[in-house]
Image (cartoon, rainbow, N blue to C red):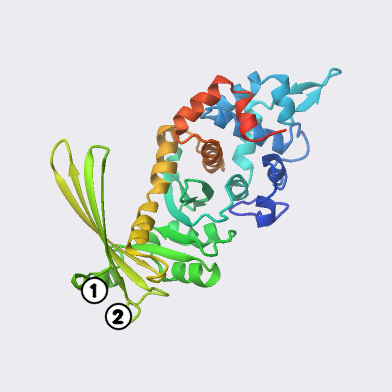
Amino acid sequence: MCRQSVTVCLVKSPSRQHRGIVGLDGRLRTLSDPRRRRGRRHSLVSVLLVAACAVLAGALSYAAVGQWACNAPQDALARLGARTAGPFDVRQAPSTSTIRRVLLAVCPGGLADLLGCVPDEAGTVAVDGKSARGSRTDEAPAAHLLAAVTGSGQTLTQWRVPDKTNEITCFTALLEPFDLTGTVVTADALHTQREHAKFLVERKEAHYLLTVKRNQPHLHAALRALPWKQCTAVRYDREAGHGRRETRSVRVLTVTGLGLDFPHVVQAAKILRHRTNTKTGRTARQTVYAITDLTSREASPQRIGRLARSQWVIENRLHHVRDTTFREDASKIRTGHGPENMAALRNLAINTLRDHGHPNIAAGLREMSFHPFTRPLDLLQLP
């Protein structure tokens, strides 16, 4: 069974070789078609490519994707592999209902894996979840999507958290297919779990930096009791912007001989943040504790401070973009695998635009809209 799907796929899960196939169309061919053979007129790859290009051109819904396909010229449909019909071999675009049926049924885990980037030399990977609020129904909560993002803002994959559980149970399944050797994985306090630390260090040969809050009362109390006043490894950073001034101090202690009960922990960090609102003059103070298996030679206070801030990459460069630019929370896509598959297509659009030098995704989408039937296809390197 493929990842998170009731569809029996050609592969149990996209392997590293499948994810490394050159060309988006080649990778998508490794997915199996969930539709019955009878009445199937458009190939799975062509329908998915149409949806990917339409989202990259700014489409936000099934209707918008279908409208883009309906207006696509013959040369664009040929590059997308659309079927031919009639004596003159006229290309026919898939209808809105066909696109909807495919995105409702295609394997979401396999699609997200194949559309994501490869974590080679990523350095850091942040893990966090987001709910698609508009997908909530009277019978079921909103779809909650757990994603993994590199330090440069490229999405690796995502995983829909089952309705009757939480992110903790999906952490290992999300990262299992990827080679994370030497990569530092960061996560919020929810994922500060002993099994997660063992999984990363022992199975994936990766490193971790995990935040500790009061949901782990004994560990949090042990960290607070450490001799921070005697700490000599301190880093100070100051910055101003977005209407505030912020000063951060990072204190780091080696805790291997201090009896801190957590697997493979080597260092602990105390991060103190002072923020001042430049308009109102109000100040706020926040203390955050973190633990890592990195030694003092591998991670100085400066690097640990950067790693702690890298966790915000997934909020600023993925979740915020999907909320504001793609209006994901307002989307009423609710049934089947629609919410997670549309989110995977949005992740692909964000990855593609960043790969081609568009740090502002909204501006990149506007540029795609000037030539909606050529530029998206060129960026996805379709023949």
Q: Position of residue 181 (x, y in %)?
A: 55, 64
| Nearer to me, 98 or 18 | 18
User: Residue beneath label 2, please?
Assistant: 258
Q: Position of residue 374 (x, y in %)?
A: 64, 24
Q: Quick one: label 2, few (<14), some, or many (20+) residues within 10 Å? A: few
| 360 to 293, vertically: above or below | above
* Residue at (70% x, 38% y) in the render: 45
Q: Kindly identify the amino acid type of the residue bearing the numbered disc 1.
A: Leu
| 350 to 13, vertically: above or below | above
User: Residue beneath label 1, please?
Assistant: 226
Q: Are marks 2 and 1 in contact (CB under 8 Å)?
A: yes
Q: Position of residue 276 (x, y in %)?
A: 18, 44
| 364 to 143, vertically: above or below | above
Q: Kindly identify the amino acid type of the residue bearing the numbered disc 2.
A: Leu
Q: Position of residue 109 (x, y in %)?
A: 59, 50
> Is 78 situated left or right of 336 in this image?
right
